[in-house]
Image (cartoon, grey):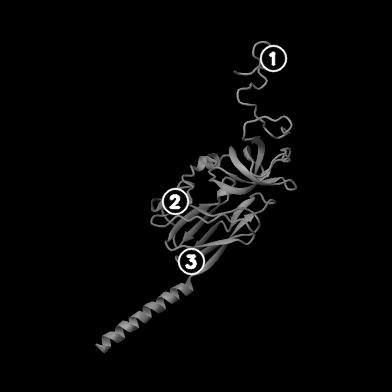
């Protein structure tokens, strides 16, 4: 009986030793989230591709003040899809431990269409039939982002959006807003800073104001708002300035002719 007890005790000690040893061998790797306005590729992960081992951890670090996250596109069958929170501050980070071997592809939501994508190989790469999901095409569950469309949608270079303004930075030509989902860009509902193109007047915008806006991807791979429209549907000539698309009152024609040579009203 004593022999059996000793054997069981030694077995437990050995298992504990192996578990501790395995944890000690696990490594942590850093992937930087980069915004570099001077580079041909403005937004990118560094490194964009990395190979690790099961049990290792990836730590994503935002290296400047900008909005980035890491969202899984495709993962090995049986593995979980991952999605980081939005990292906005310089030095902000998020870590994830990869337990199942295979290939994991992912992207940054705000900058996916600008090419900010990455790939992680855990152990050995997965064969296509061993993968689940697809680029921007899985459900994020608790995050409520739903289906993100397909590659064709993510490649769109312009779209319309609706959002509520939080602040206006006239010095840097930026606005901070919370926008509704923009399917054409595969963007979920988010709060973010957006650059505004030169010539678009921001002086009449105020916090908590709801707007519609047109956004385009520039040659420098940066999305900018190119047109802003007041969302209340009312036309105030005093506030209609260059760069703003000011709609007419509902029922009015845009410079139309009612047949008597005068711009008419629909009654």
* Residue at position x 73%, y 48% in the image: 172
Give whichever of discs 3 and 2 has the lower sequence position. 3
Q: CA distance from mark 3 to mark 2?
A: 25 Å
Give whichever of discs 1 and 3 has the lower sequence position. 3
User: Circle 2 sits on which residue?
Assistant: 141
Residue ranking furthest to the left: 1
Q: Nearer the viewer, residue 32 or 145?
A: 145
Quadrant for the N terminus, please. Answer: bottom left
Q: Which mark is residue 56?
A: 3
Q: Nearer the viewer, residue 59 or 155?
A: 59
Q: CA distance from mark 1 to mark 3?
A: 73 Å
Q: CA distance from mark 2 to mark 1?
A: 56 Å
Local secondary structure at mark 2: helix
* Residue 143 visible, this angle: yes
User: Circle 1 sits on which residue?
Assistant: 262
Residue 163 percent coordinates (x, y): 60, 42
């Amino acid at each position: 009986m004593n022999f059996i007890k000793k054997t069981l005790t030694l077995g437990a000690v050995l298992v504990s030793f192996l578990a501790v040893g395995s944890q000690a061998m696990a490594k942590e790797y850093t992937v930087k989230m980069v915004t570099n306005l001077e580079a041909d590729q403005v937004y990118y992960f560094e490194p964009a591709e990395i190979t690790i081992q099961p049990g290792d951890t990836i730590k994503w670090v935002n290296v400047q003040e900008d909005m980035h996250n890491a969202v899984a596109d495709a993962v090995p069958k049986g593995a979980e899809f991952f999605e980081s929170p939005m990292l906005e501050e310089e030095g902000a980070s998020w870590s994830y431990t990869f337990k199942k071997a295979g290939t994991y592809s992912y992207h940054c939501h705000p900058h996916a269409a600008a090419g900010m994508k990455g790939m992680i190989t855990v152990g050995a790469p997965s064969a296509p039939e061993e993968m689940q999901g697809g680029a921007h095409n899985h459900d994020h569950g608790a995050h409520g982002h739903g289906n993100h469309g397909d590659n064709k949608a993510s490649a769109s270079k312009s779209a319309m959006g609706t959002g509520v303004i939080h602040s206006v930075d006239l010095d840097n030509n930026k606005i901070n807003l919370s926008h509704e989902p923009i399917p054409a860009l595969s963007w979920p509902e988010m709060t973010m800073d957006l650059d505004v193109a030169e010539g678009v007047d921001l002086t009449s915008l105020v916090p908590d104001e709801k707007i519609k806006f047109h956004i385009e991807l520039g040659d420098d791979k940066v999305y900018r708002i190119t047109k802003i429209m007041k969302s209340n549907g009312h036309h105030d000539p005093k506030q209609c300035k260059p760069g703003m698309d000011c709609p007419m009152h509902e029922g009015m024609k845009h410079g139309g002719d009612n047949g008597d040579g005068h711009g008419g009203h629909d009654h």
